Amino acid sequence: MLDKAPNDRQILKLPPAYMPSSTPYAGPDFRPEVKSACISNRLITTGLKISKVIVLGNVAVGKSCLVNRFCHSVFDQNYKATIGVDFEVERFDVLQVPFNLQIWDTAGQERFKCIASSYYRGAHAIVVVFDLTNLYSLSSCPAWLEDALKANTVRPLVFLVGTKRDLLSEAAYKHVEDQATRMARALQAEYWCVSSKLGLNVDRFFNRIAALTFNMSVLQECQEIGQSKEIGSGLVSKSK
Ligand SMILES: Nc1nc2c(ncn2[C@@H]2O[C@H](COP(=O)(O)OP(=O)(O)OP(=O)(O)O)[C@@H](O)[C@H]2O)c(=O)[nH]1
């Protein structure tokens, strides 16, 4: 029997998108079939459910700070380059079902790209990170996403995250937000703005990823159960 996840990692309702107008993942809550499968404990998979999240983007945009703020509630002002990849696991209970989020923090430096990209496969979510104070890092996002999508046969959920919100005035931020939301639309990604220094939006963002990837994986399981029932009762015609 597993212990419960900490209170701030218990999700009973789907956390909202940062901007409802800047997400391809509409819907106010978990899908009804997902809720009823969890409530009635109809999930066939035994053991812990797991989703893989990969975090990528240009050098020093703030990927490690984002992950460390969420997983360890810390912020380091000093830059330490990631060598290859770092890996964290966060335990949740979603709709009272135990769930793990595996977070892969990859290196932005070109010389580690080969190592980092070997971890792109089998992702359930891709987080493409840029620095709100550096528009060049925003322009690099399509290339990062393209590389990650190439390694995955099923399209993962995609998030575009602007970091270091604390460094911009409201007016300067609005200007960048305009360009960032346009980029998010082009990438079919959900847009978020965060500050790891202040902890702004960081928990909300990762809770949203956990909830959406959980929703997707249970939905898939429900569909598989439905299909196997149909096959069992002879309702699916065999192709000749
Ligand atoms: N002011 C401010 N600085 C930040 C924030 N997030 C990160 N930084 C700073 O940005 C620098 C780079 O942060 P990292 O998280 O190490 O960057 P990274 O993207 O992981 O870098 P690589 O591992 O080389 O790809 C560090 O000096 C951080 O302190 C933030 O929210 N606000």
Image (cartoon, rainbow, N blue to C red):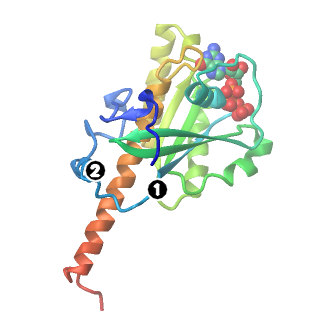
In front: label 1 or label 2: 1
| Residue 148 versus residue 108 in the image, above or below | below
For residue 183, side relative to residue 144 (left or right): left
Q: Which mark is residue 47?
A: 1
Residue plotted at (46% across, 45% down): 2
**First of labels 1, 2 by sequence position:** 2
- Indicate the amino acid at tag 2: Val
Which residue is at the front of the view, 180 or 235? 235
Q: Residue at x 50, y 25 (%)?
A: 202
Q: Position of residue 133 (x, y in %)?
A: 60, 18
Q: Quadrant of residue 56?
A: top right
x%, y% of residue 131?
Answer: 60, 25
- The answer to whether one can see residue 240 in this image is yes
Disc 1 residue crowd, few under 14, some 14–19, many 20+, Cα 10 Å: few
> Is disc 1's CB within 8 Å of ligand 1?
no
Q: Is residue 59 visible?
A: no
Q: Amino acid at mark 1?
A: Gly
- On screen, residue 150 versus residue 98, left or right, reads right
Residue 145 pos. (x, y %): 56, 45
Q: Residues within 10 Å of mark 2 (few under 14, many from 20)?
A: many
Q: Position of residue 107 (x, y in %)?
A: 71, 39
Report helix, strand or loop for mark 2. helix
Q: Are marks 1 and 2 in contact (CB under 8 Å)?
A: no
State the residue in front, 141 or 38: 38
Is residue 125 shown above or below 236? above
Residue toward you, 142 or 55:
55
Q: CA distance from mark 1 to mark 2?
A: 17 Å
Q: Which residue is mark 2?
A: 34
Q: Residue at x 39, y 27 (%)?
A: 18
